[in-house]
Image (spheres, rainbow, N blue to C red):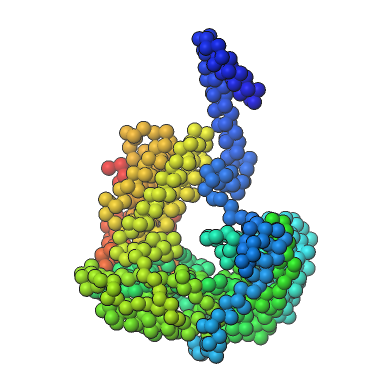
Amino acid sequence: MIKSINHKCKLYKKWIKTRRIHDENKYKNYAKCLRRILTAAEKAYYLGVFDARAHNSKAIWKNINSLINYKQEKSSDAMHIVRNGTKIDCPSEVAEAFNNYFCEVSERLSSSSAYSNNINLNFNNYLKTPSASSFYCSSITELELFEVVKKLKPSKTCIGNCISSSVLKDSFTFISKPLLYICNLSFETGIFPDQLKVSKIIPIFKKGRKTEMSNYRPISITNPIAKIIERLLHVRMINYLDRFNLIYDYQFGFRKNYSTSIAVLDVVNMVQNELFKGNYVLGIFMDLQKAFDTVNISILLSKLEYYGFRGCCLDWFRSYLKDRPQYTVVNDSVSALRTSTCGIPQGTVLGPLLFTLFINDIAASLKKANIKLFADDSNMFVIADNPTALFNTANCELSNLSQWIKANRLHVNYDKTNYILFEANKKSNVICDPSTLPSISLDGHVIERVHVVKYLGVFINEKLSWIEHIDHLISKVSRLSGILYRNKMFLPMSCKKNIYFALIQSNLTYCIEVYANVSKTLLHPLIIKCNRLLRSLQFKSRLTPQSELYSAFGTLPVDLLFDFYTIKFMHRCLYSSHLIPVSVRSWFVKSSSIHTHNTRHKEQFAIQSKFNPNSLLFYGPAMWAKLPLHLQNEQSVSSFLRSYMDWLSKKLLK
């Protein structure tokens, strides 16, 4: 192939030199033939690269990401960092600097004046009556251990002189009994083995300047035996916490059947319906600085005991959390071992659940405000019928919240904390001059007012018009369209379909129940962009019917996807209510709970006029009521979704 390309270059030079028609025709014919061969070779190469029979899904997606350059690796190659004004570029020194920074971050933040002046605040003031129940860790069976080991991701990494997960999985048949004995012994004695505490820290860049260590997140990689023990305990903890309903209802992070989309739906429904009543809503979006890394271990242990983790189990957590050695790796350079005195290791199985319990009592600090949580994302909402009361209440509640934060030795990132004001249209003339509004402050820091906020991946403006989020989606589709256009000739159709669903469809359907409830005029540019992309991927002309474009990929336009996912959610609420959060179950009521008449629709959703017509609480039941009866009565999820998709596809043909 290289010889042919070189030969083409020689023919070109000869033609330029002689300027004879014979040499020109010879060069052009050869170039045309070579172009055909190169195109066929490139196509054959991509067919091999994306052949599902020859590669697993992980390898295929790695090739896809490499091809379209969509996911650039967030490398820890921080070869140039600045510490105390001094530039460091030696990999071993960089690794040492990162390790020291991660171990000392809590002490550095705690030395602030705000913390020092409030050292006597007691976190116990926010804890009510301790749980009457106590957690019991039941014995592990060999079958349960086998299921956990089977789910381990194969890896050749060895941490703390322990075997890798690949070796563990391969040799499980021979070591299952001693491994089972070790796991049960750990829980019975309340001791987590010291050798299993060692963590390998990888600094992962977030955003901002790459030279600042504060812009990196420490991700802990632990050995597989530690992960197995944590996973076994995690399952038991979740069962206990769910059984006694100990976790805050509006904590949407790291919980089964909870998700970011439900968290967004909850906030938007609340705001829309309060505005419909004529109230004002102030949303304060707070950023906790290094939340996981600054958790006080003594406070966490006290809270675990408060929630019922007592006796031998509490001893196990004390052993697990204290004196954890860690080393940081940067560009294959390894720092010295150092023990961290604070924080919950990120990347561990138990880490997110332990942090959830640590901030579980945060709502007890508030009297007239609602707080919505997603892991360490804490968002406070204040409601009032006039702006003066709204801002006064907000400042008062922020002061209360600040006391809880200081009592629990956490820290606020004031620069990343802001607020947004939602006001009903009929009252928009009341607050017209921003200078007349009082300031919102937290610990003496004035909080910035914004008009658009990105909340869990969704752009929300103060008018709830969704213009910014739709523009963001249009931009994403346009960017990917350009990348795929350059490679569409060589990619197999199955690969193009995978890319569309993973990088386009997933973005379109995320919180589509919220943002797509707008006029067709607003959605039209997004639909047009998707149509163009599908035409390009399928080599279709502009005259191709929309139904043909979407049926080829087994999907729907954005406006019909809105119908599909909204009705899917309604079906889940009606027939699978046990799979939705407790806080969501009260959103909808059946007609039988409102009246006693024996009607055909008594077990269906009631449409309640007290809700905002733009809220899911209103249009969800309204859309469900318009479905054919055979769909409304279909209880099987899979059968319902197939039938409803067919029904919408036929609707697209009309």
Q: Quadrant of the N terminus?
A: top right
Q: Nearer the viewer, residue 448 or 618?
A: 448
Image location of residue 217, percent across then percent down: 59, 65
Image quadrant where one finds the C terminus: top left
User: Residue drawn 33% across and 59% down?
Assistant: 466
Q: Nearer the viewer, residue 160 or 635?
A: 160
Q: Is residue 546 above or below residue 114?
A: above
Q: From the top left corner, tell me how far across and down residue 148 is, in percent.
A: 65, 64
Count of numbered marks:
0
- Depth check: give the residue in front, 188 or 72: 72
Rendering quarter of residue 280: bottom left
Q: Look at the image and tell me whether residue 80 can be seen.
A: yes
Furthest-front residue in view? 85
Q: Position of residue 443 (x, y in %)?
A: 45, 81
- Residue 464 vs residue 43: left or right? left
Establish if 497 lies above or below 142: above
Identify the residue shown where x is 57% and y is 24%: 37
Q: Does residue 357 lie above or below 74 as drawn?
A: below
**Residue 135 appears anywhere in the view:** no
Which residue occupies 55% across, 90% down?
120
Q: Is 383 displayed left or right of 336 in the figure? A: left
Q: Position of residue 211 (x, y in %)?
A: 59, 60
Residue name at image x 34 percent, y 74 percent: 282
120 displayed left or right of 102: left
